[in-house]
Amino acid sequence: MSVLKINSLKKTYDNGTQALKGVDLTIKTGMYGLLGPNGAGKSTLMKTIATLQEPDEGTIFLNDLDVLKEKHEVRKILGFLPQEFDVYPKATAYELLNHLAVLKGVTDSGVRKETINVLLEKTNLIHAKNKHLGGFSGGMKQRFGIAQALIGNPQLLIVDEPTAGLDPEERFRFHNILSELGENIIVILSTHIVEDVTELCNSMAIINQGQVIIESHPENVLSNLKGKIWKKVIDKNQIDEIEKTFKVISSRMYMGKTMVHIWAETDPGNDFIHIEPDLEDAYFYYIHTNQLKV
Ligand code: ADP
């Protein structure tokens, strides 16, 4: 079991944006979901853990390894799939993996060949081994991103906003690969898509405006809201009135009408129906109320 411990991490960019305002997280072997809206500070946090940028304050330890000081050691055991994985369109999958494996210190050509073939098998790309990356679909690029991140058997895999632009089948495949990895190593999945966390993660945190709002298991996050979420289908033009009276946590189109979810300690009346909270309710509740740790 590995443990990644992040303490009091702070980062202010040169333009004055406070991207991280003192982040504390404890992340153990398994799939960990870091959920937050755009601009929450997720990428800043991911890049900092991946030793690609410096924080102003704070510490990060992977077991006994001081991540911020021993960058070279960290890079040997780290896999990073950035938000945008710019592939070289003219290289083939094999060529680029070979190049990256050399950079990662896999010097023996026999070992390298074997490693690359295993990774291409694992990510279902063996058939595209000699194809140019420029012709890859979105899903293939993502899986290629995973393949390159896995060179050198990382103990820690960081995946930043991965499933944007994937069709359902590609997303399913990608999720399968991640959850298999999560059985043995720490996989941090940073995302603004609640479903990704619901489907994959056994631990999670919600981050907003550079702060961790809640860190827990998904079922604990939900249990705080049990019995307090209510729904109702309304006409679009009723929403203003509803918002004045109730604590609306989300509203969305539903068969041409609007479905509102509200938070209420007791039965709000008004034809609202009680529902079991899902992670999306929890996410909107915590983001909107910005209520600190419960
Ligand atoms: P997320 O990944 O959750 O969308 P980011 O970490 O990318 O969040 O950004 C957090 C905040 O920091 C945002 O307000 C963003 O505009 C700002 N930010 C990110 N990178 C930079 C940068 N290089 N310079 C200035 N501000 C930045």
Image: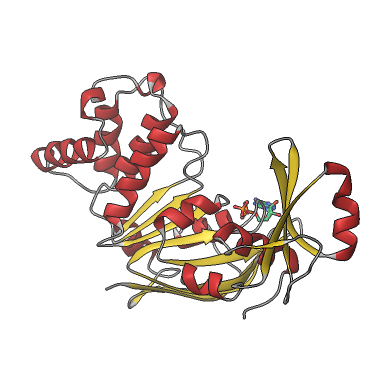
Query: Whole-percent x and y of residue 291?
Result: 70, 74
The vertical placement of 229 against 111, above or below, is below
User: From this viewpoint, is residue 209 visible?
Assistant: no
Extreme-left residue of the structure: 110
Residue at x 74%, y 68% (from the top left corner): 289
Q: Is residue 100 above or below residue 189?
A: above
Given residues 273 and 130, the one toward you in this image is 273
Left or right, 66 with respect to 278, comes to left
**Residue drawn where x is 64% and y is 54% of the image:** 37
Residue found at the very far bottom of the displayed protein: 294
The structure residue drawn at horizontal position 47% and vertical position 56%, both measured from the top left corner, is: 197
Location of residue 42 with respect to 120 vertically, above or below: below
Name the quadrant containing residue 208.
bottom right
Residue 272, picture quadrant? bottom right
Q: Quadrant of the C terminus?
A: bottom right
Q: Residue at x 26, y 30 (%)?
A: 125
Q: Horizontal and vertical percent for residue 34?
A: 51, 61
Left or right of residue 97: residue 58: right
Foreground pick, 93 / 243: 243
- In the image, taking residue 112 as reference, residue 98 lies left or right, namely right
> What x and y, as percent, mark residue 90?
37, 19
Residue 208 vs residue 275, the one in the foreground: 275
- Residue 28: tell me if it is visible: yes
Task: Point out the image quarter for the N terminus.
Answer: bottom left
Say which quarter of the image contains residue 31: bottom left
